[in-house]
Image (cartoon, rainbow, N blue to C red):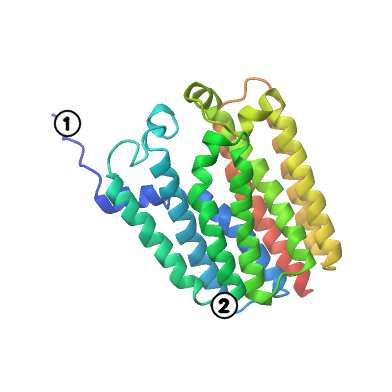
Amino acid sequence: MLSEQQPEPTWQTVIRLLRWDKPAGRLILMIPALWAVFLAARGTPPVSLVAVIVLGTFATSGAGCVINDLWDRDIDPQVERTRTRPLASRALSVKVGVFVALVALACAGILALYLNPLSFGLCVAAVPVIVFYPSAKRIFPVPQLVLSIAWGFAVLISWSAAAARLEPPTWILWGAVVLWTLGFDTVYAMPDREDDRRIGVNSSALFFGDRAPDAVAIFFAGTAILLGWLGIAMQLHWTFWLALAVAIGGWVWHCFQLHQEDIPSSLYGQIFRQNVGIGFILLAGMIAGTLL
């Protein structure tokens, strides 16, 4: 006789609610923040500041995931990819979800106290974007743009934390991150197109339709151009250009794959995860490019 499956411990369910069991989504927010802090500090930011940024991105992204699931708790059960999420499956109650979100935001707020007034103010400004982003898919045709702007705050907060100001290269990097996020999150939305269309919510993958692979190509091309501009503006050395060449090669390959017929649904997740690797390659190039 088969033994009954043991119920999942509550702490593991909370970890799934925060999506800390899926590090790719957490790391891909951390990467722009690390790009910014290392570039702003010319390769040598204080270790304590890097630690605050790393912990802050985990807390903030976790809070964002919980807030998203609270908004979508009645939609997620209708989508194959999201139906097992803790709030969608009713493994956790709404009250628990609200409590976890508040604790995560409080942790992020405590960490933000370490930062200077400009950075702290930017943290406060980011909160409404994080809280109301999930509603964008109901009223805005390209909700991924709102997410991209939220991602862009990671650049502004981290750069100002290291340099105590926002500089012209800050905005070049901000633009690159917004376009990069539009690219990889459009890919992430592609396997949900039929479910989203049936439910009646928006996504960039639906907005661009059959041209979605072309849109992703444009977003990645724009990212590469802006990163190249950043490299020139900051006079980064050859290691950065090598890393950028590798990144461009990865994005070209991704766009080639997206333009094929009969794409397996697993490909979209693979491309999303591979962008984490691309982000860290660029980070290594940026650090070395500022130090050489």
Instruction: Report whether 122 appears left or right of 256.
Output: left
- Give the number of the disc on residue 84: none
User: Does any portion of residue 272 appear in the rendered image?
Assistant: yes
Instruction: Report whether 47 appears left or right of 18.
Output: right
Above or below, 100 against 234 in this view is above
Mark 2: amino acid: Val
* Label 2: which secondary element: helix
Structural crowding at the residue carrying mark 2, measured as other residues with C-alpha within 10 Å and reported as few (<14), some (14–19) or many (≥20) = few
The residue under the point 47% across, 25% down is 199
The residue nearer to you, when weighing 19 against 252, is: 19
Q: x%, y% of residue 35?
A: 67, 63
User: Does any portion of residue 237 appear in the rendered image?
Assistant: no
Q: x%, y% of residue 189?
A: 57, 34
Above or below, 235 against 13 in this view is below
The residue under the point 41% across, 32% down is 75
Instruction: Report whether 80 appears left or right of 262.
Output: left
Q: Quadrant of the C terminus?
A: bottom right
**Res 119 → quadrant:** bottom right
Mark 1: amino acid: Leu
- Give the number of the disc on residue 2: 1
Question: Which residue carries the number 2 mark?
Answer: 47
Q: Quadrant of the N terminus?
A: top left
Above or below, 85 against 245 in this view is above
The residue under the point 61% across, 66% down is 157
* Label 1: which secondary element: loop
